């Protein structure tokens, strides 16, 4: 029972690390598929801002409807929570999605994710320097190994000409992802993950509605059929169906899993374990888009897995 503890502010709530690990792994796999699906949507003519707005608004409406019928009491909002949730929704939820879409629209998905997954280092540094949490030496070694493995996965030395705006967006996405995980880790001590995620998407949706009014959205494109590209080039799906996946599986389920996992494992470990996403994304790119998966990438994937196992043994 050494791995069972209790969370302050949640009497009787047990921490179950194995459950937390399973949640993050599931989220990483869904995020990996979501990257390729999102890239198909972006190539249909939908902009990164438009896709982000649909993602945030759709996720909020989905969570609100489900909670209204199942756990209406969880939607109660205390006035003192509002400023925190506004920052969480804009700086975390809204920015991490938009910056991610901007980066994958201008960079190969693997490269964009490698840069974005500098976030675990930012999380570990913040937890150590600001929250005064103990970050063991093994965690730092795991982070270095994970980044080295990711570099092999995406073959960063291959001479790819990187788009400056894409690199800047990916770096900013790393910062936004760190903000999201750190703020969510604190918030789930006092609010359940589903309502936290719901309010995060509410304020993200309100922010994007102010930036770009909803009536400006090109609704006429939703019925357009687009090629799935790569090995599935001969198949077509309507844009609305692809967006439905992005909203439900690629957003609602994934963000909820990450928030719920923070009740069981620390933000630092969530960040490291989430590094499975670039490895999985490379696998999706191979299976779907026909991208080659060479020896260096296989070796890199193995290094990332070793890094993750090393981090998880640092009790």
Image (cartoon, helix red, strand yellow):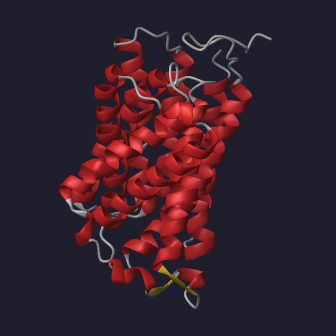
Residue 113 is at least partly visible in this image: yes
Q: Quadrant of residue 312?
A: top right
Q: Position of residue 134 (x, y in %)?
A: 49, 9
Measured as percent of width and height from the top left, residue 112 is found at 39, 55
Residue nearest the observer in this picture, 293 or 313: 313
Count the labels in the image: 0
User: Picture coordinates of residue 270 (x, y %)?
Assistant: 55, 32
276, 82: nearer the viewer? 82
Q: In this view of the protein, which residue sits in the foreground, 38 or 146?
A: 38
Quadrant location of the N terminus in the rendered image: top right
Which residue is rendered at x = 73% and y = 15% of the image? 3
Horizontal and vertical percent for residue 56? 39, 53
Regarding residue 272, the answer to whether it shows in the image is no
Residue occupying image coordinates x 56% and y 42%: 256
Residue found 69% across the figure and 12% down from its top: 12
Q: Which residue lies furthest to the right in this view?
A: 1
Q: Quadrant of residue 100?
A: bottom left
Asked where in the image residue 42 lies, by quadrant, the reply is: bottom left
Compared across the picture, whether 295 is left or right of 131 comes to right
Looking at the image, residue 173 lies above or below residue 100: above
Q: In which quarter of the image is the C terminus?
A: top right
Q: What residue is shown at x 55% (from left), y 23% (from top)?
A: 266
Q: In this view, does 27 lie above or below 261?
A: below
In-image side of 246 versus 108 (left or right): right
């Amino acid at each position: 029972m050494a791995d069972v503890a209790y969370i302050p502010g949640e009497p009787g709530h047990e921490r179950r690390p194995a459950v937390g690990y399973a949640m993050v792994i599931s989220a990483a796999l869904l995020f990996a598929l979501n990257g390729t699906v999102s890239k198909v949507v972006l190539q249909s003519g939908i902009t990164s801002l438009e896709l982000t707005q649909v993602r945030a608004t759709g996720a909020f409406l989905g969570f609100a409807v489900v909670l209204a019928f199942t756990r209406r009491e969880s939607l109660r909002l205390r006035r003192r929570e509002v400023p925190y949730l506004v920052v969480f929704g804009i700086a975390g939820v809204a920015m991490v999605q938009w910056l991610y879409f901007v980066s994958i629209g201008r960079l190969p998905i693997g490269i964009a994710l490698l840069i974005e997954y500098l976030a675990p280092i930012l999380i570990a540094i913040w937890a150590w320097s600001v929250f005064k949490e103990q970050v063991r030496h093994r965690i730092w070694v795991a982070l270095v190994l994970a980044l080295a493995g990711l570099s092999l996965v995406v073959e960063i030395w291959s001479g790819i000409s990187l788009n400056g705006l894409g690199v800047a967006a990916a770096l900013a996405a790393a910062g936004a992802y760190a903000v999201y995980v750190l703020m969510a880790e604190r918030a789930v001590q006092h609010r359940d993950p589903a309502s936290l995620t719901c309010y995060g998407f509410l304020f993200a949706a309100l922010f994007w509605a102010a930036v770009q009014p909803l009536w400006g959205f090109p609704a006429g494109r939703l019925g357009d059929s687009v090629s799935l590209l790569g090995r599935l080039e001969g198949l077509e799906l309507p844009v609305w169906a692809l967006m439905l996946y992005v909203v439900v599986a690629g957003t609602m389920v994934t963000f909820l899993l990450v928030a719920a996992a923070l009740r069981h494992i620390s933000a630092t470990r969530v960040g490291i374990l989430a590094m499975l996403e670039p490895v999985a994304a490379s696998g999706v790119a191979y299976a779907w888009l026909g991208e080659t998966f060479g020896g260096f990438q296989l070796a890199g994937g193995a290094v990332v897995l070793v890094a993750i196992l090393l981090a998880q043994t640092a009790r």
